Amino acid sequence: MTQPTLAHATEFGRMYSRSLTSAPEVPSITTVIGQEPKDLTGWAGHLATTELVQDDRLTGAVGSASQLKTLARHASSAAERFRDAAARRGDRVHHYAEQVALRSLGGAHEAESARAVLTEHGESAFADRFDEWWQLYDVRPIAAEITVWNHAVGYAGTLDLVAEIAGRTCVIDFKTKGLDRRGRAKPLNESVVMQLVAGMQAEERLVDAQAGIWEPWTHGKESLLMAVAISEAEVVPVQASPDALKPHWHKFWALRQVWEHTRRTAEAGPALRPLPPPPAPAAARAAVGAPAPAGAGSPTDAVPPVTPRA
């Protein structure tokens, strides 16, 4: 998948700048959505256990504490390896989808080489299913990989595709999915609605990254918001329900505030500091013959009052 030109990896997640020569200013849509906590411990534990029991070296390691520790250490990173492999596969599928759109738009493209890369990884079925969906829905692309910006809330992002389908302008997000036990595409997470509605609420789209030129975003309010799950077995397109847009937009707005305040607290520095004991009372010092410390005063003298900033 094409790396968004104005996206930057920062300590606060991916952020966007207004041009190639300006500093990052706002978080990406996916960074904002990522502020929602997700408990993946059960999934990670399942992957680790599955990898351990399926390891051919396990039988030979029984009775050897050092070998068992080595296998356990390797199995403990199973979730991370699975995640990274899925992300690379998703990039390859997204790249192919983008190149198909560019080819349809009559521009320079790498559709053939992108398909060849999928074939090299044994993933050509993803391209086959995508092509079938593209033809069945008679997708007519308007723009691919569009970077958009919202000033009012403060975020930016890159949308996969804007296209016309059955006479309707659609804002589309592609998701690469594995298969469930029935051999069907795994369902999409509802957080994709936040991603789509954030794209719909954009105010500008990028025209020239080098010069930092933007223009008004015109494919928002009236567009149909579509998420497309691409798997080896099938492609499943779904629409973001109009009734769900407002609450998911409010949730996205709230997560944007979480990101902002998390950044502010991090930039404020350590939130806790050591607190020394108060000076000993004069009577106690006299009893032990200790001199009064220089500048001794009340305990509150050592700790200035805190005035919280808005």
Image (cartoon, helix red, strand yellow):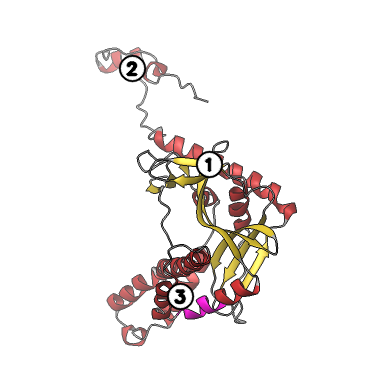
Residue assigned mark 1: 215
Q: Which residues are magenta?
A: 123-129
Disc 2 or disc 3, which is closer to the eye? 3
**Left or right: where does residue 224 sit relative to residue 134?**
right
Disc 1 or disc 2, which is closer to the eye? 1
Q: Of the residues shown, which amino acid type is indicated by label 2?
A: Ala
- Give percent across and percent down for residue 19: 40, 41
- Give percent across and percent down for residue 100: 50, 68
Spatial CA distance of label 1 from label 3 is 51 Å
Spatial CA distance of label 1 from label 2 is 74 Å
**Are the residues flagged by discs 1 and 3 in contact, CB closer than 8 Å?**
no
- Mark 1 neighbour density, 10 Å: few (under 14) some (14–19) many (20 or more): few
- Give percent across and percent down for residue 67: 29, 78
Nearer to me, 297 or 22: 22
- Identify the mark nearer the N-term, 2 or 3: 3
Residue assigned mark 3: 49
Q: Is residue 176 above or below residue 125?
A: above
Nearer to me, 194 or 111: 111
Spatial CA distance of label 2 from label 3 is 62 Å
Residue assigned mark 2: 284
- Mark 3 neighbour density, 10 Å: few (under 14) some (14–19) many (20 or more): some
Q: Of the residues shown, which amino acid type is indicated by label 1?
A: Glu
Q: Residue at x 65, y 70 (%)?
A: 137
Secondary structure beneath dot 3 equals helix
Q: Where, by quadrant of the figure, is residue 210 drawn?
A: top left
- Give percent across and percent down for residue 226: 64, 60
- Mark 2 neighbour density, 10 Å: few (under 14) some (14–19) many (20 or more): few
